Amino acid sequence: MTTHIRIFDTTLRDGEQSPGASMNVEEKVLVAKQLARLNVDIIEAGFAFSSPGDFEAVHRIGQEVEGPTVCSLARAKPEDIDAAWKALKGTPKPRIHTFLSASDIHLKHQFRMTREEALARAVDMVKHARGYVDDVEFSPMDATRADISYLCEVVEAVIDAGAKTVNIPDTVGYTTPQEFGEIIRTLRTRVRDCDRAFISVHCHNDLGLAVANSMAAIYAGARQVECTINGIGERAGNASLEEVVMGLRTREDFYQAGTQIHTEEISKTSRLVSKITGMVVQPNKAIVGANAFAHTSGIHQDGLLKDKSTYEIMQPDSIGLTQSRLVMGKLSGRHAFREELNKLGYSLTDEEINAAFERFKRLADQKRELFEEDLEAIVSETATKVPERYSLKALSTQSGMNQVPTATVELDIEGEILKETGTGDGPVDAVYRTIAQITQTKSKLLSYVVKAITGGTDAQGEVSVRLEQDGETVTGNGADTDIIVASAHAYLNALNKLASQLERRKDTGKKIGLC
Ligand code: KIV
Ligand code: ZN
C-alpha cells in the first residue's frame, strides 16, 4: 500500500532566508496561492514574531489561501507562540511550529542551557501552543548532531505534551543518507508509541545531500518532508520540493510512498519563485533546470525516437513542461483575457485585471502573439506591484562601436517630471547611472540577469536585478520586447521596493534572527 508523505513547503520561511531572497508580503501571497495550486499539504508562511512583514504575511496567507494548512514558526518562547497564534487566528487549518536546539554544541555555546532545562522548556512550549491549536509541530534543532538517547527523550516528551508532528532537522546539513535513515529508525523503535505523531524531516544541503537524506528518511518511516521550491534556503539551501516529489513519483515502486502534489504545476511554480526571489535556477538542476529534459547525444536521440522509455525516466509534461501555448493576440478582448487567466489558475480582482489588461494591450502592440509565459509575467508583475515612487516616462539610448554609451531618461517622481542625460560603460550602465543620478539613490547593484520569456526574435526579454542598500536586499523585475527598456523597468521596480522596505523599517525596526 502507498503511504502518503506530507509535503511541508518552507519556501516562504527557510527559503526566504537565502541570502538576498527576501520577498514582500504581496509576493509571498502570490507564491502561497501557487503553492496551493501545487497542492502542498502545509505552507510555512513565515515567522510571525520576527517582523511586522512576516506577521502580515502569515495572517494574509491564512486568510486568503485556500486548501493547505498554514503554519507559523515560533521559537520556544511564549511571546513567539502568542504572536504566531495572533497571526493565524481565523485561518481554517492553523499550525504552530516551535523549535529549540537539542545538540550539546547549540545548548552549551548558543542557548547556555542544560539538556534538562531545554527539555522542560520544549515540553512547556508545546503545551502552551496546544492551548491555542491542536496542530502543533516541534523541532529539536540540530538533531543530527545531538546525542541520540537525549533526542529520543525529547521526542517522546514533546509527543506526550501534545505535539502532533515532530520534525527532525539536519540544521547544518551534516548527516548522510545511511546515518539519517538509522536515526529515524532508532527514533521509531526507541520512542514509546512513536507513531502517535508524524515524524518529519528537514534537511539542509551543505554537503549536497538534502534530497538523498530526505529520501533515506522516508524509506526509514518519516511521513512528512520539509522542502522548498528550487531548493532555496539558508546557505546551500533546503531539500528541493520538486526533486523529492518527482523522486517519489518516479520510484513509487521502491518507496511504496507518494504525495498529493499536482506535479504539472511544478515548472510554473519554479519559474515564479525564481522570478520573485531573483535566484536563478542552474541549467543542469534536476527536474526544473533548462537542460533537465534536453537530450543532445546522438545515441540518446536515436533511442528516444524509437521509444521514449529508453532514456526518459519522467515525461516533461508530468511537471507541466509543454510546448509554449499560444493564448492571445492583439485583437483579444478583456473578457477573453480574464478567461485565459482563469484557465491558468489566476483569479484577479477587477482592479488587478484592469492593470494587467493595460499591460497586455501595450505588449500586444509590440508582439503579435502572446504565450502562456507572457501572461504569467504580466500577472506576477501586476500582483506584486509596490507603490510607485519612481516611474519611467521616456527612455532613449545611443551606443555602438566607437561611441560613448549615452542614455536620456525621463522619470515621474511622485508627480514631478525630471529628465537627465548620462553616460556609462554600456547602454544599461548608462541608464542605471542616469536613474541613480535623477533619483539620488545610492544602492549597490548585486546582480543583473536577462533571459527571454519565450522563443523568437520578438520575445519579451525579462530582466531581474538585485539591489542592496543599508542592509536591505530586493529583487526587481521588468519585461519588455526591448531589453534596455526591460532593464530600466527592473531597476525602477527594485528602487520602488527598496524605498517601501526602508520606509517600513523606519516605522517597525529590523527583522529579528532565528535564535
Ligand atoms: O534548519 C532548521 O533547523 C530549521 C528549524 C527552525 C526547523 O529551519
Ligand atoms: Zn532550516
Image: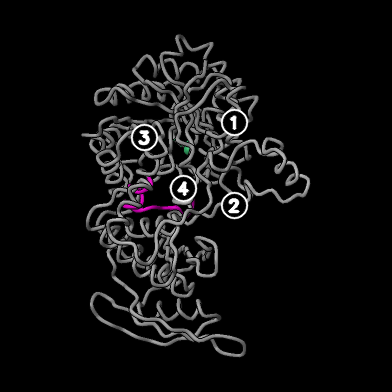
- Its colouring scheme is one colour
**Contact, mark 4 vs mark 2 (Cβ under 8 Å):** no
First in sequence: mark 2 vs mark 3: 3
Q: Nearer the viewer, mark 1 or mark 3?
A: 1
Which sits in the foreground, 302 or 412?
302
The mark found on residue 268 in the picture is 4
Q: Residue at x 59, y 52 (%)?
A: 290
The amino acid pointed to by label 1 is Thr
Quick one: 326 or 140, which is closer to the camera?
326
In three-dimensional space, the C-alpha distance between marks 1 and 3, rounded to whole angstroms, equals: 37 Å
Asked if labels 2 and 1 touch by Cβ distance under 8 angstroms, the answer is: no
The kind of residue tagged 2 is Ala
Query: Disc number at residue 301?
Result: none
The Cα–Cα distance between marks 1 and 4, rounded to whole angstroms, is: 20 Å
How far apart are labels 1 and 2 at the CA level?
20 Å
Crowding near the residue tagged with mark 4, few <14, some 14–19, many ≥20 C-alpha atoms within 10 Å: some
Q: Position of residue 232 (x, y in %)?
A: 50, 46
Question: For residue 20: magenta?
Answer: yes
Most extreme residue toward the right is 299
Secondary structure, mark 4, is: helix
Query: Which element is circle 1 on?
Result: helix
Residue underneath mark 2: 290
Query: Mark 4 and mark 3: span between their CA atoms?
Result: 33 Å
Marks 4 and 2, how far apart at CA = 13 Å
Using the rendered view, name the quadrant where residue 10 is placed: top left
Q: Note whether residue 102 is visible.
A: no
Residue named by callout 1:
250
Q: Which residue is labeled 3 in the image?
A: 75
The reply to whether callout 4 and callout 3 are in contact (CB within 8 Å) is no
Does the residue tagged 2 have its C-beta within 8 Å of any atom of ligand 2?
no
